Amino acid sequence: MSGQDIKSRPIYTPLARDPAGRAHLLISDGAAPSPEAFAPGTSAADFAEIWNVMGHSQALPAPLAGSGAQAFRSASHLLDMLRHRLARETMGLRLYAVGAEHFCWDVAGCASAAGMGREEFFLFATGKPSRRVVCVHCRTLNAHVRTNLITCAGCHAQLFVRDHFSRRGNAFMGVQLDAEAPGETIDLEELTS
Amino acid sequence: MMDQPVLALCVAASEALSPTLRRLTLVAADGGRLPPAAAGAHVTLTLSVAGHARPLKNSYTLVSADPERGYTLIVRRTNPSRGGSQHIHEALTVGDGLEASVPHNLFALHSQAKKVLLIGGGIGITPLLAFVAALRARGGRFELHQICSAEEQDTFAALIGAQPGETVHLHAGRASFDAAAVLGAQPLGTHVYSCGPAALMDAIERQAAALGWPASHVHREDFGAAGGEPFTLTIGSSGARIAVAADQTMLEALEAAGIDAGSLCRGGACGVCAVPVRAGELEHRDHYLSAQERQSGGLVMPCVSRARGDSLVLDI
């Protein structure tokens, strides 16, 4: 059941500054964006404004300046400020998100909710695979999934984690492992992507 | 080529809004229901004009389209007229029958837009009037800028009928409209729709791109970029030669010669009338062919494009 060829699985292209944009905001869920997120010839220094997640209770952002680097205490803190910022932005902004896949798609969700189109934000998922998985049977969202099999935190079903990804729901699909053939099992594996 | 069903219509009302603007209301000739159409749709009228051997086809935006109350459109008398607008202003009267294509929409409102910016030049106001009605009905946020001559400001203001709380600006002439300032002040999620002279829409497109607007948020409606130097068309299969006059489009010349080229928007947007080219240099004016298709010179949209030079051979 590995090597699933599922078209909804996003493919990420290394980031470069979109020359058509008027302003550029780079967002990462770490203390600094991972260098592997950038296309050759591009680095974090090419982006006028960078927001990072420090993961520290002492992190306090300065008043939103429109340039330079900002530190946020958590991803939730950053996403809240992003919604606030996008509601006051004018046309021409480009967003770039680097980090865990679910974080990138949280940023994409903020962008879509603000009316940004698919040409206005760019994502690059990095780091160890860590998925948000929705149980199709009880709708529970299971966070930080690193294996192909999990026990749903909501209904305790044994779920097989498919590569089927919902951009709107920002979650992979988890389906009861033996839904088709009762009693069927497979080996537990670490997710590789 | 798509089969184009024809509607049999009848003029229910015709009223002069100004010396050059006339509003027509068209209903189904048999009293039945008309096909509905979303804001931004147009129809192509077939007009039997005195002095023309074959009927003329002109496309007009629907200002409103109610299946029972009928379609309304506003026609500007052009000077010089190729016959169509003059016919509508002077000859067509209540009770007259005429044929029309079913409505087609190449200029629909984006359902996810947070705000809609409408920019009209002159008679380009017609789709914007349909948009305003649709946006009012759905509670959509919009801002309207209409550019017109000082003499027509009152007429256009009355057509728009701005309501309290709406952002509506009438500009007397292009010079008093600052595209950069207007486009630069729009919130994320805005879609701009422009309709008017090509130079105005080109300027808006350029300015929007310079301010970082993605192309998917910039919409324009082109109608009848006719006219240019006269030239001669040669039909590849028969060798027949057809003169295209300075005030005529290639499509009109083909139709006048009895060749049914098939068309839809007649404004270079839909691609239905595209014909293959065997020889001759082209001046592409459409918004349908890709840069690559233009480069190869194998296709032309006769509704708006012309020959660059005095002859063109079509592969039909």
Image (cartoon, coloured by chain):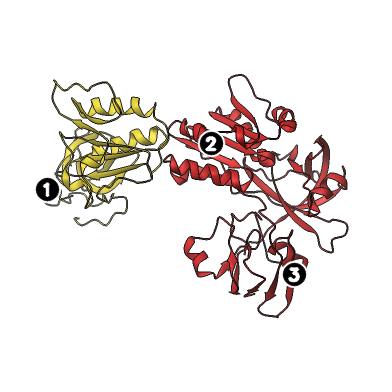
Chain colours: A yellow, B red
Residue occupied by mark 1: A190
**Label 1 chain ID:** A
Disc 1/disc 2 C-alpha distance (Å): 55 Å
Residue B179 tag number = 2
Q: Quadrant of the C terminus of chain B?
A: bottom right
Residue ID for mark 3: B243
Establish whether labels 2 and 3 are both on one chain: yes
| Circle 2: residue type | Ala
Regarding mark 1 in the picture, which secondary structure is present there?
loop
Query: Tag 2, which chain?
Result: B
The answer to whether marks 1 and 2 sit on the same chain is no
Q: Position of residue B24 (x, y in %)?
A: 79, 41
Q: Nearer the viewer, residue B78 or B223?
A: B78
Task: Give the residue drawn at x 62%, y 19%.
Answer: B164
**Residue A103 percent location from the top left of the image:** 24, 36
Distance between mark 2 and mark 3 Cα atoms: 40 Å
Q: Nearer the viewer, residue B263 or B103?
A: B263
The residue depicted at 38 percent of the width and 39 percent of the height is A22
Give the total of numbered labels: 3
Decide: few, some or many residues near mark 2? Use Cα within 10 Å; few <14, some 14-19, many ≥20: some
Q: Residue at x 38, y 45 (%)?
A: A20
What amino acid is found at the position of numbered circle 3 in the picture? Ala
Quarter-of-image position of residue B138: top right
